[in-house]
Image (spheres, rainbow, N blue to C red):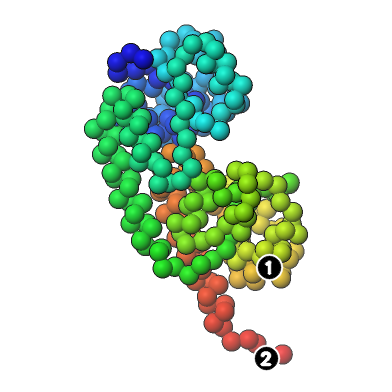
Amino acid sequence: MPLPPLRIVSLAPGATAMLFEAGAGAQVLATSAYSLEPPAARRLPRIGDAYSVDLERLLSLHPDVVVVWDGGNNPAQIERIARLGIPLYRERVQRLADMPASLRRLGRLAGTGAAADAAAQRFAVRLAALRERYRGAAPITVLLEVLRHPLYTLGPREAVSDALGICGAQNIFEDLGPLASAVSTEAVIARDPQVIIALASRAEGAAWLADWRRFPQLNAVRDGNLLDFDDLRLTRLGPAMLDATEELCALIDRARARARDRRGRPALSP
């Protein structure tokens, strides 16, 4: 590796956002689809997405290093880049608590250690404050719905599940192994979540949630806790995930209050 500043190509939205936050945005030559944060990243050329990369364009940029998302980019494409002799930096975070250390490592890579350390410290302070805010919150169970047909949810190793935990909520499928898994409607009914959250656009999420109203026995349906959440920063795994987590926690706290109010309401006479 040459000395910084480096010629960097980032092939994941989260990695791109992390590089900018670490003070290395000026060294990023190109990135991938959906790299929308920060706004300055939107001006960079796109040379691929999670599935494929234009290797000819990549080579024409003469990068010193390519930053990939370990577990998010197509492994075959990553292997092809490695065979071209281009150094790879494999970025990976599974929890919000991983982000400060990741920012510091990227700062060391790019020679922007001071900026990265400051960003890491700001993130850690905000995360600690958010954890403290919901530390004593009443537990509440949640289904995270990421696809309706077939029904897909997220397992415990997904960073969004970690965000739920910070909000004082529990993923009803925290025992699943893979990052994302297909589950049955019957399995959801058996686990009876108090909240169902559709991680989708408002229109799409509304359609998904309408399907659950066919099951009035579910706690989430009875309490009116069928919620859509369309802030995609929650799934892009960049620093702005913390902003999205704050929004998610506020949404869940309102759901918690509705469930509490319903339990405290006297039953109607027959």
Q: In terms of secondary structure, where does tag 1 sit? A: loop
Identity of the residue furthest to the bottom in this view: 269
Q: Is residue 264 left or right of residue 128?
A: right
- Work out which quarter of the rendered image holds the N terminus and state it: top left
**Residue on which disc 1 sits:** 218
Q: Report how far apart the C-alphas of labels 2 and 1 lie in the structure.
A: 22 Å
- Work out which quarter of the rendered image holds the C terminus and state it: bottom right
Give how far across and how far down residue 154 sits, in percent: 60, 48
Give how far across and how far down residue 36 sits, in percent: 46, 33
Residue at 36% across, 51% down: 127
Dot 2, how many residues are within 10 Å of its Cα: few (below 14), some (14-19), or many (20+)?
few
Q: Is residue 51 left or right of residue 32?
A: right
Residue at 38% across, 58% down: 131
Q: How many marks?
A: 2
Note whether residue 203 is visible: no
Q: Label 2 is placed on what type of residue? A: Ser
**Residue on which disc 2 sits:** 269
Q: Is residue 220 above or below residue 83?
A: below
